[in-house]
Image (tube, helix red, strand yellow):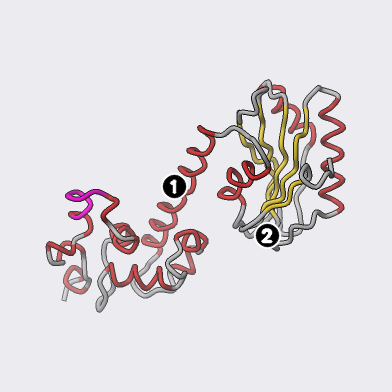
């Protein structure tokens, strides 16, 4: 028996059950999450259709696409019928969705509060297993000019080059910056290193008439604002 006959490819399904055709005829909104994932993987295993396999994968993360996006390649490959190529396709599609969300937020973004920073940065660093430090650069209307990663480190912390932070600010003609990093542990308590770095960046920025408006610690579901807690 050939491989083509061994697997439930989408072409072999009943016409009403073909998600590719359904997308073309009815639009992407008409498809369930499982049907969209099924299009990515194209075929299931010998005894399971792509949609059934997709439903099983989604069920493992309580049908939460954000949780699905956290799965590593090897974790996806645990499912029978998901090889490396299919795992990569799922990961790439979800990463594109994440980046689109960030880009949409940036286009409309004007910072009004610490919650604005949480909404901007949570999709970027909120669920990472390691710590990253980012800077949000603002113009005089508090419109976001750029968000930039300054460091990426292990779960215990990161190293930040203060000179690079200010160099980027000058190149962008930014008048204010907001610092942001994540705590993979979920803790919202700033460390002594967090407090010390904030003070160091604030002193250095003031000499160039650039304001440090806030330092926001991001976790998956919440945040801590230095400004809100009067720590600036």
Residue range highlighted in magenta? 22-27
Q: Earlier in the sequence, mark 2 or mark 1?
A: 1
Q: What residue is disc 1 on?
A: 96
Q: What residue is disc 2 on?
A: 184
Numbered circles on residues, count:
2
In percent of width and height, residue 85 lies at 37, 60
In percent of width and height, residue 55 lies at 34, 70
The numbered mark at residue 208 is: none
- Residue at 82%, 42% in the rendered image: 198
In percent of width and height, residue 197 lies at 83, 43
In the shown orientation, is residue 63 left or right of residue 163? left
Kindly state the secondary structure of the residue where label 2 is placed: loop
- Image quadrant where residue 209 sits: top right
Decide which of 48, 195 is in the foreground and name it: 195
Decide which of 103, 53 is in the foreground and name it: 103
Determine the CA span between mark 2 and mark 1: 22 Å
Kindly state the secondary structure of the residue where label 1 is placed: helix
Please rate how many residues cluster around mark 1, counting C-alpha atoms within 10 Å: few if below 14, some from 14 to 19, many from 20.
few
- Residue at 84%, 40% in the rendered image: 232
Q: Is residue 79 magenta?
A: no
Q: Quadrant of the N terminus?
A: bottom left
């Amino acid at each position: 028996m050939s491989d083509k006959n061994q697997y439930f490819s989408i072409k072999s399904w009943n016409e009403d059950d073909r998600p590719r055709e359904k997308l073309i005829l009815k639009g992407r909104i008409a498809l369930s999450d499982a049907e969209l994932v099924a299009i990515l993987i194209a075929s299931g295993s010998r005894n399971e259709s792509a949609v059934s396999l997709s439903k099983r994968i989604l069920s493992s993360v309580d049908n939460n696409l954000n949780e699905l996006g956290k799965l590593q390649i090897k974790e996806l490959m645990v499912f029978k019928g998901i090889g490396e190529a299919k795992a990569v396709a799922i990961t790439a599609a979800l990463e594109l969705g994440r980046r689109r969300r960030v880009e949409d937020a940036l286009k409309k973004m004007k910072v009004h509060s610490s919650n604005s920073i949480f909404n901007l940065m949570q999709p970027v660093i909120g669920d990472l297993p390691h710590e990253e430090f980012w800077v949000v650069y603002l113009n005089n209307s508090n419109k976001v000019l750029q968000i930039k990663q300054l460091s990426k480190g292990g779960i215990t912390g990161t190293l930040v080059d203060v000179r690079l932070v200010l160099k980027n600010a000058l190149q962008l003609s930014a008048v204010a910056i907001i610092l942001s990093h994540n705590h993979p542990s979920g803790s919202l308590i700033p460390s002594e290193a967090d407090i010390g770095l904030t003070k160091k960046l604030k002193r250095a920025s003031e000499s160039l008439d650039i304001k440090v408006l806030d330092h926001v610690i991001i976790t998956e579901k919440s945040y801590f604002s230095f400004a809100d807690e009067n720590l600036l």
